[in-house]
Image (cartoon, rainbow, N blue to C red):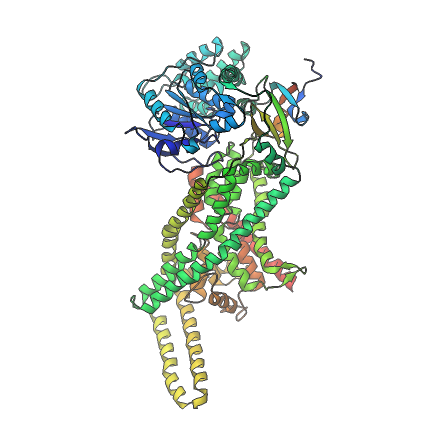
Amino acid sequence: VALLGNPNVGKTTVFNALTGYRAKVANYPGVTVDKKHGPLRGAPGVEVLDLPGTYSLAARSPDEMVAVDVLLGRRDDVPRPAAAVVVVDASNLERNLYLASQVLETGVPVVVALNMVDVATSRGHAVDAGALSARLGVPVVPLVASRGEGVPALVDAVRGALERPATPPRLVAFPDAFEREVEALGDSLPRTREGSPLPDAERRRMLLDVGGHAERRAVEAGGARVSDALAAARARLEAAGHPVAGLEASRRYAAIGPVVDAAVARPAEERTTATDRIDAVLTHRLLGSVVFLALMTAMFLSIFSWAAPVMDFVDVDVFGRLQEWIVSAGFLGGGLLESLVVDGIVGGVGGVLVFLPQILILAGFLAVLEDCGYLARAAFLMDRLLRWCGLSGRSFIPLLSSFACAIPGVLATRTIESRRDRLATLLVAPLMSCSARIPVYALLTLAFVPPVKVLGFLDARALAFASMYFVGIAVAVPVAWILKRTVLRGDPAPFLLELPPYRVPRARAVLQQMTAQGGAFVLRAGTLILATSVVVWALSTFPRDEAALARRDAAVAQVEASRAAEVAAAPEASRAEVEAAHDERKAAVEAEANGELLRRSAMGRMGRAVEPLFEPVGWDWKVGVAVIASFPAREVVVGTLGVIYGIGEADEGSESLREQLQAARFEDGPRRGEPVFTLASALALMVFFSLCCQCVSTLAVIRRETGTWRWAAFAFGYMTVLAYLAALATSAVVRALSA
Amino acid sequence: VSTAAASTLDAAPRGAAVRVVSVEGAPSVSQRLLEMGLTQGAVVSVVRTAPLGDPLEVRVRGYLLSVRRGDARLVRVEPA
């Protein structure tokens, strides 16, 4: 059984009620993209499949194509549904019945779920389900799915439809000339694999949707013969006074009008709804912009201020203690295995898991805004600005989501109808500063930006931090603009967006979104980042130079040997000082020897290979190592810098790593002895990480969504080149300014 | 209906009800406008414009739809 409906009609809530299975509930069209199914309650063996929301069977966005393909049995992975439940919004019947009438014509047994009857009642609409059922010729079940009302009746109706499918009368009358053309097309089109002509519903879609999904599929299968046949048929219809453009919509709405009139008693004057009053403020010329900016600011501030205490706790009290405990318990023997667990696994994975609070807060915020209907208004407000760089309001939600993580951002582009707009959005989405950049920004800002006031009132550190977000946006604008004028050039697609009625966000829906996002993140930390941490650890440890290792141990032993003698020789009063001096010497010897070991490791060789490229920016080979090592996930760079510049605990909050970086010096070359990190080279590194695409998960999801590695490679390539050039420029400008 | 009274949706006065006369433009654009309910004879009204002047918020068939001025220009309307 397939579940269909317009976006924002509570389709997912109906799905949950039918299956008792907790699926994600969303207000914005397209969040319910993945194939979701569950067993129908009280009907063993019957599966309910939740299809993406669509306004029409004339599919345009990738989402809608999935819905239509499943319904018409065009997909290999899903059998053609035995029945369809069309969820309609009782308070907005006309447009909802448009889709329902299309589904009725496909020949699938249909049950209409008349949802949100309570909303219709509150607007003074009295909907007569019996009259509607009589007119449509299929069962109509009134529902308030959010409260579970009417669900048992809907289950019964579905079972009834499966056992005794109704044959509804043809609701929409098309001209005879059109019906003849649909009939005739059967002969000129390729047959299905089973050898029968393509179904009637599919031929109708092909003829009606000029350049549409059905036509493209048929032309792919049958070539020019098909496109010629379609063009000829359309020309004949036009000559007969029935041009296909507008034919379907006008006939369909003409047929629906009387149905709605018969089934719905409406007040003469539409009541002013709460939505009208809220919109008067939220989309107001001045107030609307103020509220929008305030909301966005509040969202980002809350990410930092609310998450910080939790992050410190997780970082220091959970992972820091865990590392200390492992070392002090000593059951791993203090050797290679202990180093792998403490530095590689706990350090690497823990360093990433601390961002969970931020991801949860952002996901929660977005879920609340989405569920109450505000995100559609945000898209409405932002359309003008986004169009300026060649995108549309629909790109707003993917881009906003990308500030949490580019992966949900890329997935959210599925609701964009125009393929070119979708590609452009998806290619600039990773430029938005995601939460994985926060540790990089935090570490470098705290270590190298002095806590001074700029222009007397701006905190320099906050400014540096905020600038990184701005850099990504500022670069995304021209990139989108150029993409839309070069490789993705084409006619602008219409931007039509429903502004759904406001409603109180449901706690359950919000929690579901938060757990889904948080779960995905933890999974990623447990798999990809765990693997990366181990690989980075291994590449920086092997091949082990046994001679260098022996030299280190000898040097350390030498310090230790002289310690006993010197301490004994020193006067009582200065013994503590001598001890301390020896500890320092020992640490220095170890650090130098560890640097030597790293340099000879596989990672160190890679870093040295790219050093000439990084030298103009002001980075040494160790930065090269960190950049290469963070290719799978940019947040890994913090852990890697920790491993490289000093062994031990390494996360963005640790004083020791900050101090290690501040103390780092060039080991050789013309700048030997100078500090590696200055304001210029640190800011350059931040800019590099704000623009680069060091994230294997993002690249993988781009490849999955575009169907080719080409776009993933393109995203990685253009972002890396831009990141490098911008880092070079940043370094040069800061040096010039501070000179 | 005199042609002088006919205009396009983007130029319709705020809050006033107008009736759709026809929808022009390429099929890919016009079909979408028609599907969303802007068919001949439908009564629509422009509720307000976005803070940046575009797009328009239009009430049609009992719901609210955001339409760009450029697309609204394809919809010929007359006073209802």
Percent coordinates x, y for residue A131 in the rendering: 45, 16
Q: Is residue A529 visible?
A: yes
A245 lies left or right of A225: right
A51 lies left or right of A396: left
Task: Work out whether A425 lies above or below A641.
Answer: above
Q: Nearer the viewer, residue B2 or A528?
A: B2
Q: Nearer the viewer, residue A147 or A513?
A: A147
Task: Work out whether A385 lies above or below A330.
Answer: above
- Where residue A346 sits, quadrant-wise, is bottom left
Percent coordinates x, y for residue A730 in the rendering: 59, 56
Figure quadrant of the N terminus of chain A: top left
Residue at 52 percent across and 54 percent down: it is A304
Figure quadrant of the C terminus of chain A: bottom right
Q: Nearer the viewer, residue A401 or A156?
A: A156
Task: Work out whether A54 lies above or below A678.
Answer: above
Q: Is residue A544 visible?
A: no
Task: Work out whether A309 lies above or below A161.
Answer: below
Q: Nearer the viewer, residue A441 or A459?
A: A459
Percent coordinates x, y for residue A597 in the rendering: 39, 67
Q: How many marks?
A: 0
- Where residue A170 sits, quadrant-wise, is top left
Percent coordinates x, y for residue A227 in the rendering: 47, 20
